[in-house]
Image (tube, rainbow, N blue to C red):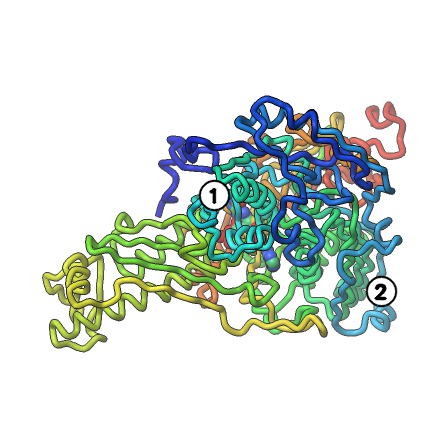
Amino acid sequence: MKNIDSNSHLRGESIYLDDVPLVAGTLFAVAFGSPHAHGKITNLDLSQAEQMPGLVRIFTYKDVPGENQIGGIVPDEPLLAEHHVHFQGMPVVLVVAESVEEAKMALKKIKIDIEPLPIITDPRVAREKGELIVPPRTFKIGDVDTAWSQCAHIVEGIAETNGQEHLYIETQGAYTFPLENGSIRIISSTQGPTAVQRHAAICLGIPMHKLEVDVTRLGGGFGGKEDQASMWAILCALATYHLKKPVKYSLDRMEDMRMTGKRNPYSSDFKIGLDKDLKIIAYEATFHQNAGAAADLSPAVLERTLFHSTNSYFVPNVRATAYSCRTNLPPNTAFRGFGGPQGMFVIEAAIHKAAEIIGVPAWEIQSKNLIKTGDEFPFGQKAESEANQCWQTAKEIFQPEQIEKDIEKFNSENVLFKKGMSFMPICFGISFTKTPMNQARALVHVYTDGSIGVSTGAVEMGQSVNTKMLQVAAQIFSVDPDRIKIHSTNTFRIANTSPSAASATADLNGKAVEIACHAILARLKTITSEKFSVSINDISIVNEEVLIKGKPMNYNWLQLIQDGYLKRIALSEHGHYAPPGLHYDAKIEKGHPFAYHVYGTALTEVTVDCLRGTYVVDSVKIVHDFGTSMNFAVDRGQIEGGLVQGIGWMTLEEIVYDENGRLRSNALSTYKVPDIYSVPKNIDLHLLKTDKDNMAILKSKAVGEPPLMYGIGTYFALRNAVKAFNPDAEMAYSTPMTPEKVLMGLIGKLETNDAITK
Ligand code: MTE
Ligand code: HPA
Ligand code: MOS
């Protein structure tokens, strides 16, 4: 089935926040962000700003009627700064005016004096100074300390991954409306409508039932709107609360880049030990997560780094410790993969470094250590593994030995161009790692004209979850999909939603839709059984026809629904779903946190231009574990998009803060994201089809985040190509692998001229 939004997207008719028609009297908000990364506010002078034309009012923390607090996991983040600022861009006051231009003019007249305090941007420095967001956590299995003695090879090193700007096409924003009796309607570009509602209630000091948060769709979220949409929505709500007027704030691109957090950068230490047969015997890792100035989601991201620290491998002896380090940068946050990619990069670096030192291809180590069904992850869950099936299928279809030979031949025949390849197996756990978040609800109405309205807690952000929700309802009722409408995500219709995140949205909300539809269907079958005096088990509905023992009765969906109404049965149902079997005990760091894992293998080939340091990704060949895909076009879109986003993170996207905590890469001219030229010339996608995953919606496994991690393969393929030109290249395991870094690797210690002659 086609994505239900594609026609309106193509015609530009889909409604995003900025397309909501303006209501008369709407005011416009702009936040004034701290010009310093760390300091004490000694003076704030708003007098000139308040005289500016069009200015309506300026709000400070003193105007927050409830608690001035938006921290979700740790209460460490004020809505508006009080006496201290902790990062450049931290909102200090909110300016509200009759137009955006007037608000921005007034903003320029704000005077602030800040007494500077020391600025930390490096997570290792933060750890030394004891600046931790939460206590460190350690995952353990076996006994690493004694295991080293059984190892023939022990390799240590450092691996670093940089952050990543979400660059959702639609920036952050919100539009709020006063309702009667102090209620407020909030339209927000958020992945977490309930997070917005909950924190707006805290800040405004009013009950959640007075706050209606409504989301039609997002122009992308990628994790950046899981928690960080709340700030802008609550700021607008604050202004609406006081002024009783509609208030809108839609950030411009540079504001968004400067003021919001990104993927958490990590700096990590690793030590890996292998026996003479290349079995990984022991692995130790210490992760330093750059959390930024407040917790935001970083403690949960940290946890997922540990859950994925051994990627797709079974390692009998592991000790992995992670520190969430407080720095003076905007609070970093969720980003596709949610700490998993950061953890996986480190073990991949360890394996590739070991391979280089031992003198074997990395894929020999990778293939010998893939996790098998029944093997235990360091956190106690037993694997239901498809890792070997994916790998073997990839070997059969893609013939890597031949590719390797072809690459060797090409490299021996070419001086200024070198090719490289790499394998990247993935293994990603599906479920929120916080077990209670794994629940969802759906509200299904069947109207008397036979049309169906479905509301869930799922937020559509381009991943096509609404299409999947529609497919579930259409399949259970066996009706024409055109009869079904997926409504906006609204906290008055669906309460206590988890954010649309963790790739689990379709599973959780889809199962709630299933439950609601089955309940309505059962009632419809009951009245049918009475009408025809037949057993319920003999009744089925197929393509809108009621069948008894498979035979048509000249009785269709519309007649059935009208009878249902006359018989006064409930044609609506609220379904609730909580996946069974999940548990986790953080005290011992053991449990069964994931409903299942998604596996896959990617084989990446690149060509490096050894004169320029530039490169192309020739192909990425993937075998991906889909379960039984319910919508292959949608799932393929997720895989291609995730892959290219991963390649961007690994190669081009370079976030630069200076020592004062100022974002230097603050525009699209200084921050490069993948474009059509960065897309692999060939993406060859093969399905591994299985049907055992009953925890996945219609056995169609979650697909949102896992493919991002295929992009990690590009980093190692590039390294291998550089090594083919300059075997002595000394390159830190540090991403992104920009053309500058490639060039430095190519020339290495040689003089530039020597390199060129060579
Ligand atoms: N795809 C698009 N087009 N836009 C997005 O914002 N977010 C990703 C992924 N794919 C995203 C996307 C992230 S971070 C997650 S967690 C999942 O979609 C969330 O949706 P799902 O749970 O329905 O997979
Ligand atoms: N993934 C994504 N988002 C989350 C998670 C998770 O595991 N936990 C809390 N928010
Ligand atoms: Mo995705 S990072 O879980 O929003």
Q: Secondary structure at mark 2?
A: loop
**Mark 2 nearby-residue class (10 Å; few <14, some 14–19, many ≥20):** some
Q: Looking at the rendering, which quadrant does residue 279 occupy?
A: bottom right
Q: Is residue 86 visible?
A: yes
Q: Is residue 652 above or below residue 124?
A: above
Residue 92 x/y as whole percent:
70, 39
- The residue positioned 75% from the left and 34% from the top of the image is 44
Q: Amino acid at mark 2?
A: Ala
Find out if the beta carbon at label 1 lies less than 8 Å from the nearest ligand 1 atom.
Answer: no
- Residue nearest the viewer, comparing 566 with 203: 203
> On the picture, is 60 further left or further right than 24?
right
- Residue named by callout 2: 152
> On the picture, is 238 further left or further right than 732?
left
Q: Earlier in the sequence, mark 1 or mark 2?
A: 2
Residue 681 x/y as whole percent:
56, 35
- Residue nearest the viewer, comparing 468 with 238: 238
- The residue positioned 64% from the left and 66% from the top of the image is 371
- The residue positioned 47% from the left and 57% from the top of the image is 209
Q: Is residue 414 visible?
A: no
Q: Secondary structure at mark 1?
A: strand
Label number found at residue 187: 1
